[in-house]
Amino acid sequence: MIAELVLLPHLKSLWTVEQEELSALRGELFVPMLAHGQLLAVLVLGSKQSGEPFLSNDVTVLSTLANQTAVAIDNAGLYQKLRQDAAALEQANIELRRLDQLKDEFIQNVSHELRTPLTFVQAYAELMLDGTLGPLTPGQRSGLQTVLKSGKRIVSMVNDIISLTKNEQDLLELVPQDLAALIQKSVEAARPVAASSHVNLCVRTPEKLIMAAGDARRLGQVLDNLMGNAIKFSPNGGEVVVQATCVGSEIHLTISDQGIGIPTEELPRIWDRFYQVDGSTKRRFGGSGLGLTIVKRIVEAHGGRVWAESTPGQGSRFTCAFPIGAP
């Protein structure tokens, strides 16, 4: 007996490609090798001697061998395809990282170029408003105040964009911080905005809360962003509560409001860059959609955690958890 394994796409090729070898056989047994309903090959068992019939046991053995071989061939093909796909994905990831780096460099360069002329616009507007460059009419003063306010908003957005293109940990100056004092300072700075929006600011903190290590400027940015959002989305007469408590080995800083709230299914996405819950919210309340992204990055760079809870129509609650104690 001789056994011949023929890897052919279909039976017709068996006779055209292997006809010379098979012509010497007096008896042949053909068993298909199938995988997922597709013919991978044909296993041929033949005899050069006449009068030797194939027994049922021969069919069983050959069928078992064909099935096992088909599985092995199929797995080998899948493995090879997976390797090729993995290599292609790795190359695509390398290219995406390169493009992402180029994008960040482009955004950072453009942002820096924008910030310089905007700083000059602000400086001259302030000089004109304080009378250094001469007297102003009421209309001119009102117009310049609008220019100055809009300029500050643009500079703030440009600074946010620059911040997102840098490694947050490289920007931190970590020293022990009294979080309670930082909260009081930020709340006092936010009171004029809250008053103009007819929102009451309520503070509930101990006299001292020493966190492990922090950057006062960046932590102040976290407070400003969260309080600014809470005030912006609060109704007239609403209340924004800023609270800090010790929970185990952490300080929990919580800012809650009585605003429009966030749908539960949207909560995981609010930390994404430029994300707004819906277009109408962006048009009504303004903003770039970067504030919460920056908050998350700053908190995590301090070794902390941040999360949000909300009930639509009743308000939202943002909590930042920071380590307690000296670094």
Image: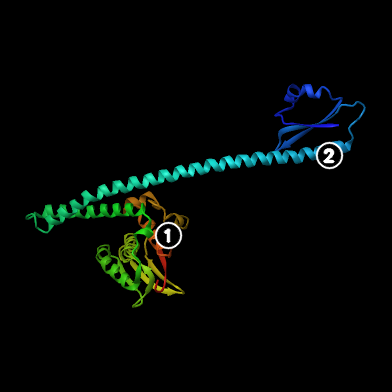
Residue located 41% across and 66% down the image: 319
- Residue 15 is left or right of residue 168, and the answer is right
Residue 312 badge: 1
Along the viewing direction, whichever of 9 and 196 lies nearer the viewer: 9
**Mark 1, secondary structure of its residue:** loop
The answer to which of marks 2 and 1 sits earlier in the sequence is: 2
Which image quadrant: the N terminus? top right
Which image quadrant: the C terminus? bottom left
Colour theme = rainbow
Q: Which residue is mark 2?
A: 61
Classify 255 as above or below 87.
Answer: below
Disc 2 residue crowd, few under 14, some 14–19, many 20+, Cα 10 Å: few
Residue 264 badge: none
Along the viewing direction, whichever of 99 and 4 lies nearer the viewer: 4
Classify 250 as above or below 154.
Answer: below
Q: Position of residue 294 (x, y in %)?
A: 37, 57
Classify 91 as above or below 163.
Answer: above
Tell me how far mark 2 sits from mark 1, CA to CA.
68 Å
Q: Nearer the viewer, mark 2 or mark 1?
A: 2
Mark 2 residue type: Val
Q: Quadrant of residue 202?
A: bottom left
Residue located 76% across and 24% down the image: 18
Along the viewing direction, whichever of 187 and 277 lies nearer the viewer: 187
Labels 2 and 1 touching (C-beta < 8 A): no
Residue located 28% across and 55% down the image: 156
- Residue 132 is left or right of residue 269, and the answer is left
Residue 245 visible within the image:
yes
**Mark 2, secondary structure of its residue:** helix
Classify 32 as above or below 277.
Answer: above
Disc 1 residue crowd, few under 14, some 14–19, many 20+, Cα 10 Å: few
